Image (cartoon, helix red, strand yellow):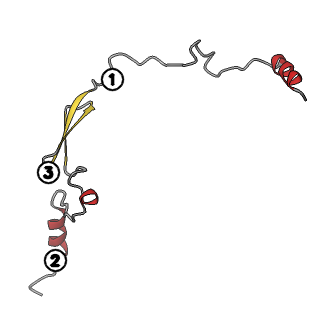
């Protein structure tokens, strides 16, 4: 089959049907966002417990984290015990051997 035969077959075939209707002339289909239901996207500050402040954008203006890239042990190479909500103390109280027995 040569090029001319292939072109004639493609011209005779059924048109391509898009499931959501034809594409606009620019080739990009965009759906309209509903108005009034999306939160405002604003400048935000992320504050780490080590004192590092990171500027970003979010739907909240202020975020606080316990560990960031500046103080995380993987990036610093220093071992640091991270105790979230007293879990280490609670574990020690629960599994501490009885001293009276």
Give the crowd class for mark 2: few <14, some 14-19, many >=20 residues within 10 Å: few
Query: Marks 3/2: CA distance?
Result: 31 Å
Whole-percent x, y for residue 73 in the image: 24, 60
In percent of width and height, residue 25 lies at: 59, 12
* Residue 94 occupies quadrant: bottom left
**Closer to the eye: label 1 or 2:** 1
Within 10 angstroms of label 3, few (less than 14), some, or many (20 or more) residues? few
In this view, which residue lies farthest toward the left? 100
Check disc 3 and report its element: helix, strand or loop: loop
Numbered circle sitting on residue 38: 1
Q: Which residue is mark 2?
A: 96
Nearest to the observer: residue 29 or residue 84: 29
Q: Position of residue 49 (x, y in %)?
A: 14, 49
Q: Residue 92 at x, y = what percent?
A: 16, 72
| Residue 19 vertical placement versus 65 (above, below) | above
Instruction: Answer with left or right where residue 18 lies relative to residue 56.
Output: right
């Amino acid at each position: 089959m040569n090029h001319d035969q292939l072109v004639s077959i493609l011209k005779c075939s059924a048109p391509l049907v898009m499931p959501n209707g034809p594409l606009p002339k620019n080739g990009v289909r965009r759906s309209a966002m509903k108005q009034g239901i999306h939160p405002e996207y604003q400048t935000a500050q992320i504050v780490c417990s080590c004192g590092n402040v990171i500027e970003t954008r979010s739907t909240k203006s202020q975020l606080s984290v316990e560990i960031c890239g500046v103080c995380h042990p993987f990036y610093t190479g220093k071992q640091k015990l991270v105790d979230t909500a007293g879990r280490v103390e609670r574990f020690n109280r629960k599994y501490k051997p009885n001293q009276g027995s």
